[in-house]
């Protein structure tokens, strides 16, 4: 049965159909059954936002399955954040972990690369309407894949693909520009335990760097980009069970920071500095939160980025005071939230949240925080 409820901080209150997940600090997210999708209760591992049908709003690609064979989907946004149409992504079920979206064949449409557990990654080309056609499998890309990133690593205006694997070497596949990828090459370290991946220019040299979050008591690492090659730099005091990572400017000094999310609920924040010199981290969060996903978003329109954590339990908002100090508040019902993404789903200029739930319906949470403050 679909349910919707109203929350103030941690206190549960049953409400009307126009319900919200609100906090004491002014953050207001609308939660309603009309904005749920993927009601078959798949094991959704990740959600990706992109305008796949070129109508000006963000659509949602769902990577379903994790370790089991399930169907991936493309959900088309009706313009208000409701997903009223869906197409299959591929004609076969598989164990998908993430979908990377971008123009890999240079024709101006958003294509999709599905990264799967112990199966080769698959390229699907967009026909321009949000329907996808199988193009090719990426040769020798199978492994214990957990996350990926698609970006221009070597400044040739062609998208490349990096796959992070929990058991084995992390790999980079240079794009061919015609929808295909070249033979992969290993990134320059052991790669053991990799489960999270984020990109950004950390040393202000114009190249896109990476941070790889690692589990199994392995050190998480920065991969500094040097003209398309990567130099590893282990993050201090990062041994643990870090499942996800975010790169965002959180401390008000204009330098990108790094946040690592541990599965036990604690976070490490590494404050940025000129030329990417990261020192020892500061810890925040609450042990026992079972954090599985993380994204940054300016919920309250104050100009600084907050954090939203997807958990096996109740999800968490970390509201930023502008200096990287966070007020923690739980929202929603308990779920197995495996992935999260932020973007404006209803065209009101505010970033909303999409939550990938493994074993229950996925959700769009519409952000009404700024409107509430203006009223």
Image: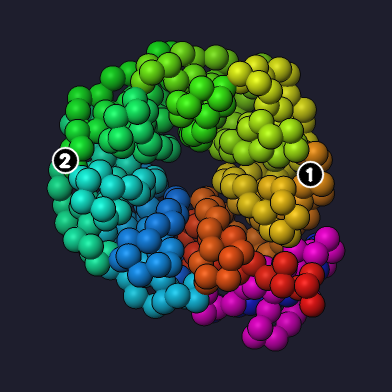
Residue labelled with disc 1: 322
Quarter of the rendering occupied by the N terminus: bottom right
Give the x, y percent position of residue 214. Answer: 53, 27
Asked if 128 appears above or below 375 in the picture, the reply is: above
Q: Could you tell whether 278 is left or right of 113 in the image?
A: right
Colour pattern of the rendering:
rainbow
Nearer-the-camera pick, 340 or 272: 272
- Secondary structure type for disc 2: loop
Residue drawn at x 65%, y 44% is 290
Q: Which mark is residue 178?
A: 2
For the residues bearing labels 1 and 2, Cβ distance under 8 angstroms = no
Which residue appears at 59% of the width and 47% of the height?
295
Residue pushed farthest bottom? 16
| Left or right, residue 219 beside residue 304 | left
* Residue extent of the magenta highlight: 11-35
Q: Magenta span has 279?
A: no
Q: Few, some or many C-alpha atoms within 10 Å of disc 1 (few <14, some 14-19, many ≥20)?
A: some
How far apart are the two marked residues, 1 and 2, measured between alpha carbons? 43 Å
Q: Residue at x 45, y 26 (%)?
A: 207
In reply to whether residue 21 is colored magenta, the answer given is yes
Q: Nearer the viewer, residue 39 or 294?
A: 294
The part of the image, by quadrant, that contains residue 50 is bottom left
Nearest to N terminus: mark 1 or mark 2: 2
Residue 106 location (% of width, % of height): 22, 46
State whether residue 264 appears in this view.
no
Q: Whole-percent x and y of residue 220?
A: 56, 23
Q: Quadrant of the C terminus?
A: bottom right
Q: Is 316 above or below relative to 185?
A: below
- Tell me: 163 left or right of 336: left
Residue at x-position 16% and y-position 40%: 178
């Amino acid at each position: 049965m679909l349910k919707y409820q109203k929350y103030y901080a941690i206190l549960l209150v049953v409400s009307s159909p126009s319900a919200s997940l609100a906090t004491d600090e002014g953050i207001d997210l609308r939660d309603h059954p009309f904005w749920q999708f993927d009601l078959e209760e798949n094991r959704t591992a990740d959600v990706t936002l992109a305008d796949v049908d070129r109508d000006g709003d963000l659509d949602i690609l769902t990577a379903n399955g994790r370790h089991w064979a399930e169907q991936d989907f493309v959900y088309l946004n009706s313009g208000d954040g409701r997903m009223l149409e869906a197409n299959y992504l591929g004609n076969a079920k598989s164990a998908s972990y993430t979908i990377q979206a971008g123009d890999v064949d240079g024709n101006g449409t958003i294509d999709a690369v599905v990264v799967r557990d112990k199966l080769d990654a698959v390229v699907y080309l967009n026909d321009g309407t949000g329907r996808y056609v199988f193009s090719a499998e990426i040769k020798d890309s199978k492994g214990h894949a957990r996350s990926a990133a698609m970006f221009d690593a070597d400044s040739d205006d062609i998208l490349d693909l990096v796959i992070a694997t929990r058991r084995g070497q992390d790999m980079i596949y240079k794009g061919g520009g015609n929808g295909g990828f070249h033979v992969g090459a290993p990134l320059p370290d052991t790669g053991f335990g990799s489960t999270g991946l984020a990109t950004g220019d950390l040393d202000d040299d114009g190249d896109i760097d990476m941070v790889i979050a690692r589990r199994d008591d392995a050190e998480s690492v920065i991969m500094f980009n040097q003209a398309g090659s990567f130099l590893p730099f282990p993050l201090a005091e990062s041994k643990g069970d870090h499942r996800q990572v975010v790169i965002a400017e959180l401390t008000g000094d204009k330098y990108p920071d790094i946040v690592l999310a541990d599965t036990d609920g604690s976070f490490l924040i590494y404050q940025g500095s000129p030329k990417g010199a990261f020192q020892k981290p500061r810890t925040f969060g609450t042990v026992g939160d079972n954090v599985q996903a993380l994204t940054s978003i300016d919920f309250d329109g104050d100009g600084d980025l907050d954090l939203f954590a997807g958990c096996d339990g109740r999800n968490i908002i970390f509201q930023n005071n502008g200096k990287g100090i966070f007020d923690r508040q739980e929202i929603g019902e308990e779920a197995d939230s495996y992935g999260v993404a932020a973007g404006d789903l209803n065209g009101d200029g505010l970033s909303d949240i999409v939550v990938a739930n493994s074993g229950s319906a996925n959700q769009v949470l519409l952000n009404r925080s700024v409107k509430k403050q203006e009223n």
